[in-house]
Image: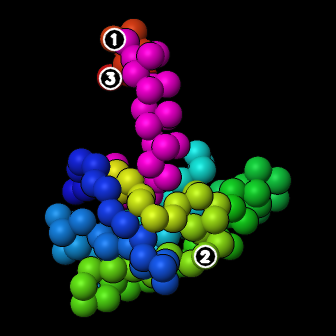
Amino acid sequence: MFLGEYTHNIDDKGRLTIPARFRGQLAAGLVVTCGFDQNLMVYPMSEWTKLAEKILAQPISSERVRELRRRVFTQAADLTPDRQGRILIPQKLREFAVVEGEALIAGMYNYVEIWNVGTWQAVNESAANGDSAERWAELGI
């Protein structure tokens, strides 16, 4: 499982070091794709397969499904960490999430998100302002 948040640098070549706590679960390979909030989502292969199967089970005749497929699959990169635990994030994905220099890596239990540090801070501040027990209850938690 992926928990916590970490800040790591992206080097000049576009390589990001995966937090040591996450490396074992991602060592066999991973997929990075565009997230929904100007972030990147990183899935271990087992979780990527589950997500892909759910998307593929949806009717191709639906315009919304086709849009989701395009967003998730066409931007995806199949990667394997190097011996130092780094991944080379393709430039188009770095540009999408505006991550260069420093990046925030957030564990989301079964996947990981990569954020621009400033964007992450703004998203967290916004969420904290609306956080309440009622909000959790609305989600059935």
The 10 Å Cα crowd at callout 3, few under 14, some 14 to 19, many 20 or more, is few
Q: CA distance from mark 3 to mark 1?
A: 9 Å
The 10 Å Cα crowd at callout 1, few under 14, some 14 to 19, many 20 or more, is few
- Across and down, in percent, residue 133 comes to 33, 11
Q: Looking at the image, is mark 2 or mark 3 nearer the viewer?
A: 2
Name above or below for residue 39 compared with residue 90.
Answer: above
Left or right: 89 with respect to 76? left
Please state which amino acid type lies under the numbered disc 3: Ile
Please state which amino acid type lies under the numbered disc 2: Gln
Describe the element under mark 3 as helix, strand or loop: loop
Choose top left, top right, bottom left or bottom right for residue 140. top left
- Across and down, in percent, residue 37 comes to 58, 45
- The answer to which of marks 3 and 1 sits earlier in the sequence is 1
Q: Which residue carries the number 3 mark?
A: 141
**In the picture, which quadrant includes the C terminus?**
top left
Q: Looking at the image, is mark 3 or mark 1 nearer the viewer?
A: 1
Identified at 44% across, 26% down, the residue is 125
Q: Which residue carries the number 1 mark?
A: 133
- The answer to which of marks 1 and 2 sits earlier in the sequence is 2
Residue 35 visible in image: no
Describe the element under mark 2 as helix, strand or loop: helix
Choose top left, top right, bottom left or bottom right for residue 91. bottom right
Please state which amino acid type lies under the numbered disc 1: Ala
Q: CA distance from mark 2 to mark 3?
A: 38 Å
Q: Residue furthest top?
A: 134
Identified at 22% across, 56% down, the residue is 1
Name above or below for residue 115 compared with residue 26.
Answer: above
Q: Which residues are magenta?
A: 107-132
Left or right: 65 with respect to 16? right
Q: Which residue carries the number 2 mark?
A: 91
